Image (cartoon, helix red, strand yellow):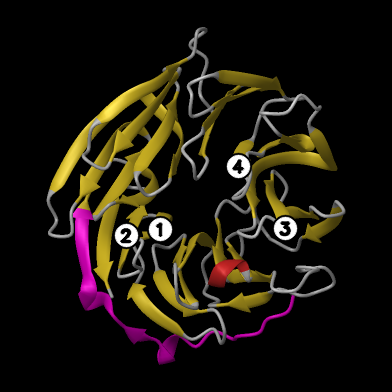
Amino acid sequence: MTVSNAPQQNSIASVGERVRPVAIGTPVAAVYFIGDRAAFVGDEETITLVSSDGEKVVVTVHGGAILSSVSDGRRIVTGGDDGKVVALDIKGESSVLVTDAKRRWIDNVAVHPDGTLAWSAGKTAFVRGLKGEDKSLEAPSSVGGLAFAPKGLRLALAHYNGVSLWFPNMTAKPERLEWAGSHLGVAFSPDSRFLITTMHEPALHGWRLADAQHMQMTGYPSRVKSMSWGMGGKFLATSGADRVVVWPFASKDGPMDKEPAMLAQLEARVTAVACHPTQDFLAAGYDNGTILMVRLTNGAKVVVRRDGAAPVAALAWNAKGSMLAFALQNGDAGLVDL
């Protein structure tokens, strides 16, 4: 890796006065927006909905740990160690979608743009179509992550030594993309041309789906736990280093034989990234509690929040890109108006 932008903290302008603190009170694992409300998904039992004027509503969705979550902007779907898949809708009403017959932990959940639902328990992945029928597939090992392709009904299952691509409505065997190691998360590029996994090792791995060509994306000092597509899929921003590592995906070859850009270096590790939905900048959170906004094209930075009592756990923009929600691992949180 090469450094493209040296630290310039003295030149950073502060917008901290726009931060409105929100006390969640419990550790937060993920943040989303459903409608106009920010939704803070706790590690245990509850989701806290916060309106733009700061009004809070706490909804209990599980009887134990919340192990996974995803949102399509209209609802949040969670999986828990109580063996249930639960949906929280835009009105703040929860409903149980699935109860595992063996009460196994629901490790992963995914939602297709058309509303089709997927979840996994151990080595088994399930898909429930719009007509309510359930289909299942056994993976070679425990499923590490699930993701639907943006187009067509195709589900990616990350597992040990690679990824399985499953068409639930077809009888053909899943396509297998192999790469040694433990794959813990998976995401399609917005144009469905590339598939990227986060690994147990400090690395990403990718495939160009047209020909299954590999892309090794290495050099991280720690595991990558957060990644976000920006500028319509032209860039993939990632955590795992003391700066935001941004891989280029605008060309047909993606990041093959290309170096990533490295932005916003601090003496702390990036723990969360969230690209703005319409403009060329992102929010980056660090393990010392700092949050920056960073322009993707030149690395210019603006401070949102300096330091904190815990690492930044999650970041999310609302659909318009007019508000940022953030949460630290200790439950400190906030909203930022642009």
Q: Secondary structure at mark 4?
A: strand
Q: Is residue 123 visible?
A: no
Q: Secondary structure at mark 3?
A: loop
Quick one: label 1 or label 2, which is nearer the N terminus?
1
- The quadrant of the image that shows the C terminus is bottom left
Quick one: label 3 or label 2, which is nearer the N terminus?
3
Q: Position of residue 144 (x, y in %)?
A: 64, 35
Quick one: label 3 or label 4, which is nearer the N terminus?
4
Real-space Cα distance between discs 3 and 4?
A: 14 Å
Q: State whether residue 65 is above or below residue 246.
A: above
The residue that mark 1 highlights is: 315
Dots 1 and 2: beta carbons under 8 Å?
Answer: yes
Q: Residues within 10 Å of mark 1 (few under 14, many from 20)?
A: many
The residue that mark 4 highlights is: 147
Q: Position of residue 220 (x, y in %)?
A: 69, 61
User: Which numbered mark, 1 or 3, is in the foreground of this view?
Assistant: 3
Quick one: label 4 or label 1, which is nearer the N terminus?
4
Q: Secondary structure at mark 2?
A: strand
